[in-house]
Image (tube, helix red, strand yellow):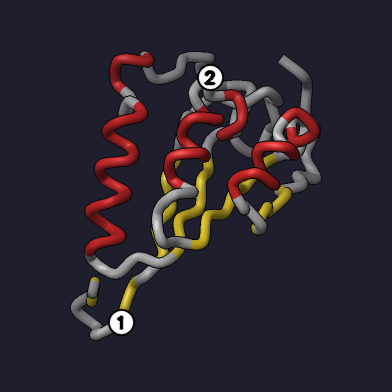
Amino acid sequence: MLVDSFNRKHDYLRISLTDKCNLRCLYCMPIDLPESFLATRSMMNVDEIIAIAKVFVDLGVTKIRLTGGEPLVRKEVREIISRLSKLPIQLALTTNAVLVDEFVDLFVETGLRSVNVSLRLFRCRYV
């Protein structure tokens, strides 16, 4: 069980799959922010994501939320969701919902039942 110095138990993990997004909102990508993203080689690969998730599950994590940027733009997202769904956790996802229609079948197939749609009331441009 994960317990912090204030004796609070933690059973929830957020995993950011990418820093990229398919929108350029002022909220997360201000005009003055350079358009540079992490190099793919700097990000955890699929096996590393699954391995670290398993470590946290062994430590008592019961819920994992996938976030980003926009997690659905990561090219291996189908494999990540499929493999994580086999762990004894509640799997959740935060998305801007632009691509959600392409993944509904996967959500149903894997039992992903918690999808948080993040609506930004900021000016956005498609990229």
Q: Is residue 44 left or right of residue 78?
A: left
Q: Amino acid at mark 1?
A: Arg
Q: Is residue 107 left or right of residue 43?
A: right
Secondary element at tag 2: loop
Residue at the image position 30 percent from the left and 15 percent from the top: 41
Q: Is residue 111 left or right of residue 40?
A: right
**In the picture, residue 70 is in which quadrant?**
top right
Q: Quadrant of the N terminus?
A: bottom left
From the top left corner, tell me how far across and down residue 107 is, in percent. Answer: 66, 44
Label 1: few (<14), some (14–19) or many (≥20) C-alpha neighbours in 10 Å: few
**Of the pair 97 and 83, the residue shown nearer to us:** 83
Mark before the other along the chain sequence, 2 or 1? 1
Residue at the image position 73 percent from the left and 37 percent from the top: 105
Q: Quadrant of the C terminus?
A: top right
As drawn, the label of residue 92 is none
From the top left corner, tell me how far across and down residue 47 is, in percent. Answer: 30, 31
Q: Residue furthest left?
A: 5
Which residue is identified by label 1? 8
Q: Is residue 26 above or below residue 40?
A: below
Q: Amino acid at mark 2?
A: Lys
**Of the pair 107 and 10, the residue shown nearer to us:** 107
As drawn, the label of residue 75 is 2
Q: CA distance from mark 2 to mark 1?
A: 36 Å
**Of the pair 94 and 121, the residue shown nearer to us:** 94
Residue at the image position 46 percent from the left and 14 percent from the top: 36
